[in-house]
Image (cartoon, rainbow, N blue to C red):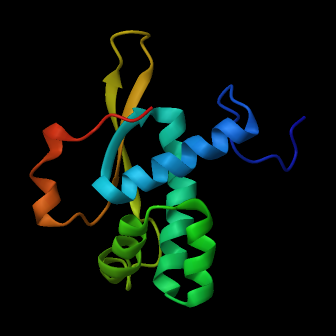
Amino acid sequence: MKHRIAGRRLDRTTEHRTAMFRNMVTSLLRHERIVTTTPKAKELKRIADKVITQAKRGTQHARRLVHRDIRDVEVLVKLFGPIAERFKTRPGGYTRIVRVGRRAGDNAEMAVIELVERTPATAGGAATEPVAG
């Protein structure tokens, strides 16, 4: 039995999985919406919500903790600026997962994961968003 074991392995090594989710959370915060498989989206939601909660604190220590996972300076500035301000009064649940069908190549279930309160400028370009995973 798997008592007290959280998270999915996703058939990857620990290093691969860690790097993949760091890249995915960076892409999610940069584009505010990405398309991936449903299991990856469910795991990404856990990580992204924790990162946004740290950004809402806005302290130097929180910035250093987040910088361990998000190494892109532009995304860090966006996270601790507009994104943190947008979710300042929200107690949690910063991301939404919407299932969008199955992938043509391998029939994998696909989902869109996006920030809940998207800005109007990014809401219009939904069709041209990058595909991750």
Residue 118 drawn at (x, y percent): 23, 63
Image quadrant in which you'd find residue 16: top right
Say if 28 sits above or below 102 in the image: below
Visible residue check, residue 43: no
Q: How many marks?
A: 0
Q: Residue at x 74, y 32 (%)?
A: 13
Say if 91 sits above or below 19 in the image: below
Q: Residue at x 38, y 84 (%)?
A: 88
Q: Residue at x 14, y 38 (%)?
A: 127
Toward the top, the furthest residue is 105
Residue 43 drawn at (x, y percent): 57, 45
68 sits left or right of 127 in the view:
right
Q: Depth check: 127 or 64 in front?
A: 64
11 sits left or right of 56 in the view:
right
Q: Residue at x 60, y 77 (%)?
A: 64
Visible residue check, residue 107: yes
Residue 85 drawn at (x, y percent): 33, 83
Image quadrant in which you'd find residue 100: top left
Toward the bottom, the furthest residue is 59
Image quadrant in which you'd find residue 19: top right
Residue 27 drawn at (x, y percent): 39, 50
Quadrant containing the C terminus in the rendered view? top left
Quadrant containing the N terminus in the rendered view? top right
